[in-house]
Image (tube, grey):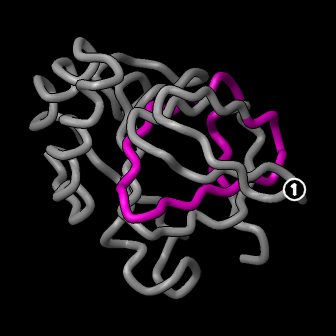
């Protein structure tokens, strides 16, 4: 299993998830050691700010690298450390986020950021530019790409 530096926050995030959904928190804890955490190769500290790489990772539960096969539907977890800006990006896949910790700030299009508590649902339509900011708490979120999953996300201006 892949261990990334951001996973230092995972035990506390699982603890916070207990307040939202105890069964889900227990399920994540049960498979924690078997998850294959990854990073997108274009998401570097040079592009996203010093320390981003140590505070970012994602894993698939359903998908080509997940527990269950899938190619045009992906479901997994995202971790972002505290005080991180996951800058404007876009992709053809419609995307659903369910933050299990929070609050976090979310933006779509040219609008401003909106603070969302744990348990919110965030939906990004295809090609819509969006971004996320964490405060002093890390983010653990369930994410899903519901189709058009072969094209990776592209950072605006990169």
104 relative position to 157: left or right: left
Residue found at the very far top of the displayed protein:
23
Q: Quadrant of residue 133?
A: bottom right
> Looking at the image, which is closer to me, 84 or 54?
84
Asked if residue 149 is among those painted magenta in the image, a careful observer would answer yes
- Residue name at image x 14 percent, y 44 percent: 11
> Looking at the image, which is closer to me, 67 or 76?
76
Q: How many marks?
A: 1
Residue found at the very far right of the displayed protein:
110
> Looking at the image, which is closer to me, 142 or 75?
142
Residue 134 in the image: x percent, y percent? 49, 60
Asked if residue 132 is among those painted magenta in the image, a careful observer would answer yes
47 relative position to 114: left or right: left
Q: Is residue 147 above or below residue 133?
A: above
- Residue name at image x 34 percent, y 53 percent: 38
Residue 42 in the image: x percent, y percent? 55, 70
The C terminus lies in which quarter of the figure? bottom right
Disc 1 target residue: 111
Determine crowd level at label 1: few under 14, some 14-19, many 20+ residues with C-alpha closer than 10 A.
Answer: few
Residue 62 in the image: x percent, y percent? 41, 22
- Residue name at image x 29 percent, y 30 percent: 17
Q: Is residue 127 above or below residue 72?
A: below
Q: Quadrant of residue 112?
A: bottom right
Q: Which region shows up in magenta? A: 124-153
- Residue name at image x 52 percent, y 29 percent: 98
The N terminus lies in which quarter of the figure? top left
């Amino acid at each position: 299993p892949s261990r990334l530096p951001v996973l230092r926050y995972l035990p506390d995030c699982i603890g916070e998830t207990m307040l939202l959904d105890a069964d889900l928190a227990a399920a994540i804890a049960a498979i924690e050691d078997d998850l294959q955490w990854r990073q997108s190769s274009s998401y570097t500290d040079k592009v996203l700010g010093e320390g981003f790489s140590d505070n970012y990772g994602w894993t698939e539960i359903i998908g080509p690298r997940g527990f269950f096969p899938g190619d045009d539907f992906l479901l997994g977890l995202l971790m972002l450390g505290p005080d991180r800006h996951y800058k404007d990006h876009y992709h053809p896949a419609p995307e659903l986020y369910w933050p299990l910790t929070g609050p976090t700030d979310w933006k779509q299009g040219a609008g401003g950021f909106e603070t969302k508590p744990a348990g919110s649902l965030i939906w990004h339509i295809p090609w819509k530019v969006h971004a996320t900011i964490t405060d002093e708490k890390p983010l653990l979120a369930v994410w899903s790409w519901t189709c058009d999953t072969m094209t990776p996300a592209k950072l605006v201006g990169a």
